[in-house]
Image (tube, rainbow, N blue to C red):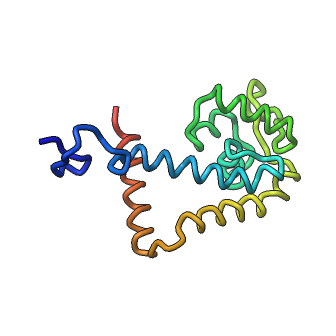
């Protein structure tokens, strides 16, 4: 007899979306991104730039490769995103004093001024997603998601 993702017997021969961790997490991610986009796009920022802004708020003046490691995206995607962010006045680049071949990335004053609004928007979306979910369930969900992320990051 086929089993579901939890190893329990299932009448279905396929994996219904309600039983698919990947489907559910992807669907949630798309809904969260849409909610975030709705709130931050009027400020000239899109969700694909948000992780970079948060990373630079935590540690400004890093190289592109360091920013790639922090937000876990590839170099080509980062290069495209940073080009758009620079065009939109969110970041600036300057030569690295230690290595003139590379640049360091800094948030602009405009981006720093927007940061509280953008972070507030993200908090609103997270609160909307968590509405009606108990604190204990939310904490369990966060632990499970972190474990799943660790499992996949550690796998070959």
Where does residue 118 sit, x and y in percent of width and height?
Answer: 74, 58
Q: Quadrant of residue 129?
A: bottom right
Residue drawn where x is 67% and y is 33% of the image: 78
In front here: 112 or 41? 41
Where does residue 105 sit, x and y in percent of width and height?
Answer: 76, 40
Pick the quarter of the image with the N terminus. Answer: top left
Note whether 153 is above or below 137 in the view shown: above
In front here: 94 or 156? 156
Q: Is residue 83 left or right of residue 132?
A: right
Note whether 5 is above or below 156 in the view shown: below
Give the number of callouts.
0
Q: Quadrant of residue 106?
A: top right
Where does residue 80 sit, x and y in percent of width and height?
Answer: 72, 29
Q: Quadrant of residue 104?
A: top right
Q: Please, which residue is most extreme toward the left here?
A: 1
In front here: 21 or 79? 21
Residue drawn where x is 40% and y is 44% of the image: 22
């Amino acid at each position: 007899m086929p089993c579901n993702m939890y190893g329990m017997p299932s009448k279905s021969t396929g994996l219904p979306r309600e039983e698919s961790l990947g489907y559910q997490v992807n669907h949630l991610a798309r809904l969260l991104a849409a909610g975030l986009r709705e709130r931050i796009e009027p400020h000239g920022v899109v969700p694909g730039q948000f992780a970079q802004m948060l990373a630079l708020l935590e540690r400004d003046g890093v190289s592109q490769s360091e920013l790639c490691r922090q937000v876990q995206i590839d170099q080509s995607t980062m290069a495209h995103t940073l080009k758009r962010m620079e065009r939109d006045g969110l970041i600036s680049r300057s030569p690295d004093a230690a290595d003139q071949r590379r640049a360091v990335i800094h948030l602009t004053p405009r981006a720093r001024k927007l940061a509280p609004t953008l972070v507030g928007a993200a908090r609103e979306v997270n609160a909307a997603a968590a509405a009606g979910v108990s604190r204990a369930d939310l904490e369990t969900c966060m632990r499970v998601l972190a474990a799943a992320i660790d499992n996949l990051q550690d796998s070959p």
